[in-house]
Amino acid sequence: MRPIELVRFAAGAIVAHPMRSVLTSLGVVIGVAAVVMMTSIGLGAQQRVTSAIASLGSNLVIVQPSAARLGGGGGFLSQGAGSGISLRDGDVDAIRRQVEGVVAVAPIVRSQAQVVAEGANWSTRVEGVTPDYMIARDLALASGRVFDEREARQGRKVAIIGQTVATNLFGTGDPVGQRIRVRTVPFEVIGVLQSKGQSSFGQDQDDVIMAPLQAVRSRLVGRRLRGDTVMNIYVKAEDGDILDRVQEDVTNVLREQHRIRPGEDDDFGTQNMASILQASQAAVATFTVLLAAVAAVSLLVGGVGIMNIMLVAVTERTREIGLRMAVGAKRNDILIQFALEAVALSLVGGLIGLAIGVAGALGMARLGAWPAAIPAWAGPLALGFSILVGLVFGAYPSWRAARLDPIEALRRE
């Protein structure tokens, strides 16, 4: 028989039982939709983690005292002020002098404070930094300017505020040139940061006030820290390729600065943002594969459903098969017809499932403010799996139909 006739017979058999065909394809529909949606969710999570970590700064090594713990103030680390903090201004100078390939070395101290301006008040994070901090963290201004080295050295009472602070204190007004009172200390706002959004730890990076290190350390943190103590040091490398080497050099310099003997534990720790990003991406990728694998189980269930219905169809259409073979149809024609029916059922289910999966992924992304990440290979892969399911699970019913004896088939009622 000609291929076009085999396709026509297969399509006619499917259309003749529309409800059964729909129910047969339902398992494949659910399976493909689930795979597409789960893959999209996993890739969206990966993009969100990558974006959040990248917002902390690129090519960055973070140095913290050994007493620090992850996940606190500033999106990185926190510790009780003055409790076991081992980093000093001298460490910053030593890293700047001795470590090659570094474009910025930025010390920081942090404190939580109540801020008042024009009758409004807001509790926020106050960071004492140097101008290098803007470079290390890849920060940019929406308006105003950054305090210079002279202002930083003199501890001038000037401040740069984040978008969240600006909105809560000044509404839609321009904060630049305005006065704010941090606790009891007046500061002049000289700049507003561009929005950075949430960090990878879920903290609002725009809810911050940055002021010269000396001003924050002497006027806001005060007796809780020694005069030359810093809480963290951010070291930005020229290139990501030398980040591991810069981290190793920073460690060696600080061990020498702190007179740590060979075999003794460091009283500080270093973190490489590239390695954190790589580990996070690997974890999310594993999670994505797990989600897709669990969702793919429903494809197997759909395949079993197709096999079951096709076996029923062979039984129901035994006389039809006998008549066709009696008038000249070959066993190969019967085999191909039933295989085409199984593949068509699975492929139609795959197309419907793909549409539902894409719509569901976009809807979930919109409702949850989640990145919509539908990979280009999702469509071909889903349809390819649908065809494979149809071939695999339709193989036995097709073979069984082709092996029927024409005389015995004609005798069946």
Image (spheres, rainbow, N blue to C red):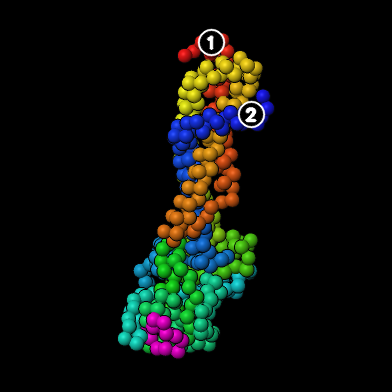
Q: Which residues are magenta?
A: 170-182
What amino acid is labelled 1 in the image?
A: Glu
Which residue: 41% across, 69% down? Answer: 204
When asked about the image quadrant of residue 320, the answer is: top right
Tell which of 237 and 334 is nearer to you.
334
Question: Which SS class for mark 2?
Answer: helix
Q: Is residue 139 visible?
A: yes
Image spot of residue 310 (x, y percent): 50, 26
Which residue: 37% across, 72% down? Answer: 82
Q: Which residue is mark 1?
A: 408
Tell which of 61 and 371 is nearer to you.
371
Image spot of residue 143 (x, y percent): 51, 82
Image spot of residue 385 (x, y percent): 56, 38
Main secondary structure along the magenta-highlighted residues: loop
Image spot of residue 14 (x, y percent): 52, 32
When asked about the image quadrant of residue 294, the answer is: top left
Q: Residues within 10 Å of mark 1 (few under 14, many from 20)?
A: few
Which residue: 38% across, 86% down? Answer: 180
Residue 348 lies within the magenta run: no
Position above or below: 97 against 298: below
- In 3D space, how far apart are the residues under numbered discs 2 and 1 (Cα atoms)? 25 Å
What amino acid is labelled 2 in the image?
A: Glu
Question: Which SS class for mark 1?
Answer: helix
Among the two numbered marks 2 and 1 on one chain, the one whose residue lies closer to the N terminus: 2
- Side (left or right) of 403 relative to 31: right
Q: Is residue 133 visible?
A: no
Which residue: 35% across, 69% down? Answer: 80
Q: Tell us which disc is closer to us: 2 or 1.
A: 2
Residue 180 lies within the magenta run: yes
Q: Which residue is mark 2?
A: 5
